[in-house]
Amino acid sequence: MSGKAKKSSRKELKRAFETAVDFIGEDWLSAQFQKHFKNRQDSDLRTGGETPELLMQYNFAATYLGYKEKRFPEFFPEGKPQEQALRFINFGTFLHEIDSAGIVTASGKWLDESLADFSRPRLRNPDEYQQTVSEIRAGSIYANMDYDVYFIEEGNQKAPDLWIPFQDSEIKIECKRCGTPGSIKDRKGIYESLINRITSATHNPSIFLFDLDRLPSPKEAQNVDQYLPSELNRRTEKDIEAPFGDIHILSYMEYTRTKGIPSYGLDSDEQLEFLYDYYIKPAIYAKTGEELDLYDSFESATIEPDGNKVAVSPKTTEYFDPMFVGIRYDGDDDLITPVVRQFDAARGKFGKEDPNILHIEVPYLDELSQEQFEELHQRLRGKLNVNSRVSVVVVTKEYMEWDDEDCLNYATFVGSEENLDPYINLPSSFHIPGYSLTEMRENPMFET
């Protein structure tokens, strides 16, 4: 991490939300929201459609924190808020951390302009929103390390995004953001559709395993229930061949309707993992011979009690007729090349006179296996060997986790690799954030 994980209470989240709204412009956000959704169907308001990401994040955050009425209560379940809401709120947190940043021209001339005035036009542009947030997030990392951070107005001259004066050096930082590959976006949407369709079409207290040969089309995912037997019960055992792979329906090892697990000392995620390990994993092993771990073996999975009935006492948590759906798919994605290509995208931004940092945000960094991360490390090292203008490459990923105390834990995971032979080295007393990429290889995020 770039530092210890931070925790924000609901009161602090509201303050961060209000900071983000003021920064972007409350009147503009309200007007754009009304304009955009004036003729939209209710379902579009929930799912986004062609909605700019900024407006979707703003809507989810405002609704979750109580600034807007919940038009779709089922879409805002109690407990964890939507990730889109957290992203908008967390943006306000980054602004708190970097609110004193100045603005300079590419030639170093000070501009009498606030960060809000400088950033607002780009934040309001759907094509530049994510990149602008990424630059502010990157700046907040260095501001948190007590460095003076300046944003560079590029103008007609190619220039990096950030400038940090340090001792006798002028450190330049170019910020790049890898968009999530379409294949990953498609996967997540398809997985969600498969799970939602199965759990809404039937609540059979059984184990449903999907072994995909390919990703189903959206239409196939939305109609996956057509492949299910017309009659299902808790003893149903069936292997089904579908155009996109196999569906295995398994029963539990025992037929008690309530599955109880200890609740003391376990958070909600640990309880679900215990439930899987105790009731579901043994059944899968007994009937298939495969020993599948919940988080290592499945691309996506859910455990859903019938009617969401969960009884909690000081000692036990009881799930009534839980239904498990797990999805496995071994399709390959090239997750490495989009990161490495950022060297080419930054070409022309760095001079030879100053130490330079290439800062790459990789939203899907945790999707990489250890083997893939080792390949990424080697290819970044290769790029550094032929790019002497880059003194250090930094890769980051934002983390957010909602805990059981109604608080948001957030941090930025940061790894870096120094160029062994740059034109200009970073000052020895300048601290590069996070881990080295070699240390990151050992992080449990990257499991084989």
Image: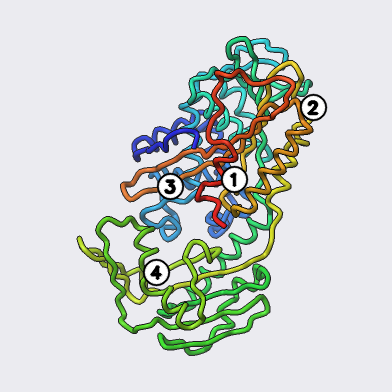
Quick check: 205 left or right of 137?
Answer: left
**Mark 3–mark 4 distance (CA, rounded to whole Å):** 23 Å
**Mark 4–mark 2 distance (CA, rounded to whole Å):** 53 Å
Residue hosting label 3: 401
> Mark 3 or 4 closer to N-term?
4
Which secondary structure, mark 3? strand
Residue hosting label 1: 363
Q: Position of residue 432 (x, y in %)?
A: 56, 27
Q: Check whether the beta carbons of the residues at disc 4 and disc 1 lie within 8 A of each other.
A: no
Q: Check whether the beta carbons of the residues at disc 4 and disc 2 lie within 8 A of each other.
A: no
**Mark 3–mark 1 distance (CA, rounded to whole Å):** 15 Å
Name the residue at 57% across, 65% down.
191
Quick check: 195 left or right of 36?
Answer: left
> Mark 4 or 2 closer to N-term?
4
Name the residue at 42% across, 88% down.
235
> Mark 3 or 2 closer to N-term?
2
Which secondary structure, mark 2? loop
**Mark 4–mark 1 distance (CA, rounded to whole Å):** 29 Å
Relative to 337, say whether 235 is above or below.
below
Q: Position of residue 381 (x, y in %)?
A: 70, 38
Quarter of image, res 167: top right
